[in-house]
Image (spheres, rainbow, N blue to C red):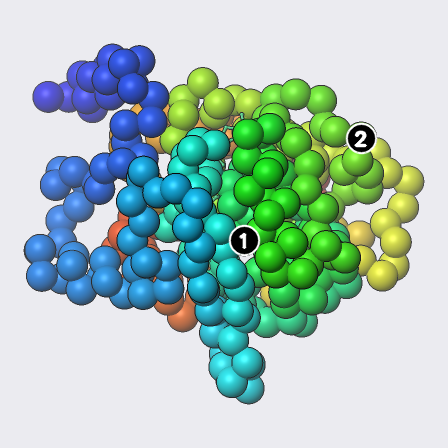
Amino acid sequence: MTFHDDLALDERLDALDPLRHLMQQPSSSDTSEDEDESSRVQSAVESLIPKQRRSILNESLELSFSGLGEQEQHPIALSLAVDASPGCGGIAWPAGEVLSSYLAKRGPGYVRGRTILELGSGTGLVGLVAARLGCESVCITDQAPLLDIMRRNVRANALEESVSVAELNWGEPLPSDIGQAPDLILAADCVYFEPAFPLLVQTLAELVDLHSSSSSRPSSSPAYDSTRQELAPETETEILFCYKKRRKADKRFFSLLKKQFSWTEVEDDPDRAVYTREAISLLRLHRRGSGGGG
Ligand SMILES: C[S@@+](CC[C@H](N)C(=O)[O-])C[C@H]1O[C@@H](n2cnc3c(N)ncnc32)[C@H](O)[C@@H]1O
């Protein structure tokens, strides 16, 4: 079967069940690891967030994310309500776990003083980790059915002061309560539904472009300069995009993304080798034509 035949088959099956690939592991043609190695890696990736049934109803997970060095003694603890009834975002997904864990390893200095926005937050996990680390403010966003579980998770962790919850449908005008341009955009496990691919790219571009349209950036919220790996004023919004490859059609997302963004792999995550084997990538996106490199 050629690549195009595979893609056509994927598309026909997607038309019948748009979320079917979320429930599957990568097929044997997508992975070349032997089974022992693959189950060892699987258990390493699942060490933080226990396996959740896709039919899970109103349960709660107690999670802990460790930092590095001195921070290792003070892991980030969170209580997370999970409930699949409002949609697939109501449980915690593997790329969200990887991104949360990366933030915890970068530690409080990475988020301090920054304004953060998360797209497709689902339960809100990644944004809540950023808040627990001490970021200035984080807005966790998703579609209307997920807002209730996000709010419950904000309250359960007493993070109301720094976390706001907003409805943000990709491809629609940005909600007015987003206000200023975020310094850091987070997105995890948001590539899975082909009709939403162009909408997600459009929203990412519009959020980054808020910077060029805002007259000045407050000096208290510098952006992260990925080339120098440090905070620097007057650079573009940083985007951390964590993605799990599930099927060949995902290439279509990256073809669309390429028109507006370039990307680099995040290389300073000590767990990178582990999640790479699980087809998960952590990328830093750079808006084309904004002088952000990449
Ligand atoms: C697979 S879940 C990932 C949830 C969370 N980021 C995680 O890693 O656990 C994908 C999320 O994207 C959201 N989503 C899908 N299409 C969307 C759209 N058009 N606008 C906004 N959010 C959307 C879903 O509601 C869901 O919460």
Residues packed near mark 2 inside 10 Å, few (<14), some (14 to 19) or many (20 plus): few
Q: Residue furthest front?
A: 58
Image quadrant for the N terminus? Answer: top left
- The residue at 46%/69% (across/down) is 64
Instruction: Label 2, secondary structure: give it.
Output: helix
Residue 273 appears in the figure: no
Amino acid tagged 2: Ser
Distance CA(mark 1)–CA(mark 2): 22 Å
The residue singled out by tag 1 in the image is 126
Residue nearest the viewer, comparing 84 with 1:
84
Q: Quick one: label 1 or label 2, which is nearer the N terminus?
A: 1
- The residue at 48%/23% (across/down) is 196
Counting from the top left corner in percent of width and height, residue 150 is at: 58, 44
The residue singled out by tag 2 in the image is 176
- The residue at 60%/36% (across/down) is 147
Residues packed near mark 1 inside 10 Å, few (<14), some (14 to 19) or many (20 plus): many
Counting from the top left corner in percent of width and height, residue 69 is at: 51, 84
